Image (cartoon, helix red, strand yellow):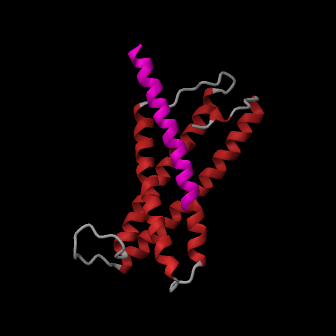
Amino acid sequence: MRSAVNEIKTERIASSLSWIIFVLFVVVFVNMMELPRIPIEAPDKDALRNFHIATGSLLFACSCFRVYFWLQSPPQKKQGQLPIEAYNQLHTLQFSLYCAFIGQGLTGIVTAWSDGLMQFLPGATTANHALWALSGYLHSVFAFFYLAIIVFIALTGFYHMIRYRVWRFRIFA
């Protein structure tokens, strides 16, 4: 009985984290689409960049917690019509997406730190153009990577929904 209660609680926390991650991703994505269109000298540029850093940091932290919960209590197959191979394929892709968000967050932190936007020690100079360029490119690589994963998850999920006649979005984690 105790184990079932803990399992339900963990599943609810994981589900809530997934929804929070989805909302944060949409907010960061909209911000990411708007930020490059604003002139560098505009006063809104700094506010949008700081908002991007703050929201991206929350997305990073929530993704870390989601991976932790995933490893502690992996999602269980609850759809009888969906073969285990299809279920595993979707959930491996979704786990990869959370890991890509973590990689995106790590490169974002290094990019902001090497640009002097974040300081961990007061008064320390952290601007390093070479590290900023490298981490910035990696930050972009992770962005393209997780966009490709999202498209692949959606296409694979809808394919499985049609092929196995599972008409629920609960096949996604």
Q: Residue at x 47, y 66 (%)?
A: 51
Q: Which residues are magenta?
A: 1-28
Residue 128 at x, y percent in the picture: 33, 78
Depicted 81 relative to depicted 35: above or below:
above
Query: Looking at this view, is 21 or 157 the one in front?
Result: 21
Q: Residue at x 22, y 76 (%)?
A: 123
Query: Looking at this view, is 23 or 87 the one in front?
Result: 23
Residue 168 at x, y percent in the picture: 70, 32
Q: Residue at x 56, y 67 (%)?
A: 32
Depicted 66 relative to depicted 110: above or below:
above
Residue 153 at x, y percent in the picture: 64, 45
Q: Residue at x 56, y 58 (%)?
A: 27
Depicted 33 relative to depicted 169: above or below:
below
The C terminus is located in which quarter? top right
Horizontal arrangement in the rendering, residue 64 relative to residue 94 (left or right): left
Query: Looking at this view, is 52 or 107 the one in front?
Result: 52
Q: Quadrant of residue 163?
A: top right
Say whether residue 24 is magenta: yes
Residue 170 at x, y percent in the picture: 63, 33
The N terminus is located in which quarter? top left
